[in-house]
Image (cartoon, coloured by chain):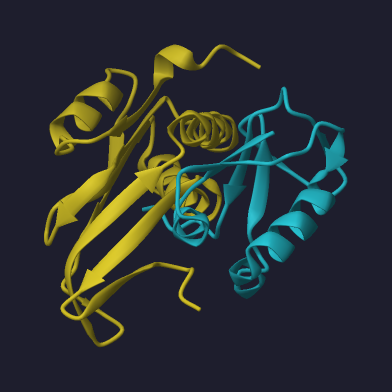
Amino acid sequence: MADNNKNIDIQILPGALSIDDCYKFVLNEKCGGINLFVGTVRRWNKGEEVTHLFFEAYVEMAIKEMKKIASAAIEQFNLEKISIHHRTGKVGLEEIAVIIATSSKHRKAAIEACEYAIDTLKKDVPIWKKEFLKDGSYWVNSRP
Amino acid sequence: MKVLCFGVAKDIVGGSEIILNKEAVITVADLKIYLNKSYPEFLKYKNYMVAVNQAYANDHATISSSDEIAIIPPVSGG
């Protein structure tokens, strides 16, 4: 497998994420298409009012899993570059929890790879979201 | 043997790691049996995974105290 490291940007950050940083990383003259997925915090979840989220990561393993996703995306979709940034700690309404940027020669690969990356991230990457409601809190996917 | 805990597992054990009094090599399945017995609340989360050296491990994988072991409750990033 080719060394894709220079085409992969993976970060887990405790502060605000920058769409511009991800965009600039994937931007390059070989590509005619860039796709950005931005995951934000919404107020209503299944009829309950959310005040904020808290993200915890098993950082070392999460970075490994995100690198696997990035490498697979490059291989499968013939991407040029991919950037995945995930936030940790307290994240307020409308703030960004995750950004995925992909670039490819033509748009289709960038769009499909981006969807693959976010779907796989949600399934495999060891990061946990605690949802804070007006009247309590719970770990998402671990509510008994 | 040290076991790292995240998410709901941290709440169940009351800390970010637990120390098991086990020296022998055991399997991931053995570890789960031990955890479910010591902290019955884990039985509510039957689908939790175990990671060994920062990679998902199946029930047959063997672990010893030199490995980095972590309890991985159902993930919910993104």
Residue B41 in percent (x, y) is at 59, 70
Quadrant of the rendering where the N terminus of chain A is positioned:
top right
Q: Give me the residue at 87% from left, 33% from top.
A: B24
Residue A52 in percent (x, y) is at 17, 63
Total numbered labels: 0
Q: Give me the residue at 28% from left, 43% from top.
A: A88
Q: Residue furthest front?
A: B21
A93 relative to B72 in the view: left or right: left
A64 relative to B61 in the view: left or right: left
Depth check: give the residue in front, A65 or A51.
A51
Answer above or below: position of A52 versus B57.
below
Depth check: give the residue in front, B39 or A134.
B39
Chain A, which colour?
yellow
Residue A107 in percent (x, y) is at 36, 42
Residue A36 visible in the snapshot = no
Answer above or below: position of A11 versus B19.
above
Chain B, which colour?
cyan
Q: Give me the residue at 11% from left, 59% from top.
A: A94
Q: Residue furthest bottom?
A: A47
Q: Give me the residue at 12% from left, 62% from top.
A: A93
Residue A76 visible in the snapshot = yes
Answer above or below: position of A16 versus A144.
above
A30 relative to B56 in the view: left or right: left
Q: Quadrant of residue B51?
A: top right
Residue A139 in percent (x, y) is at 39, 65
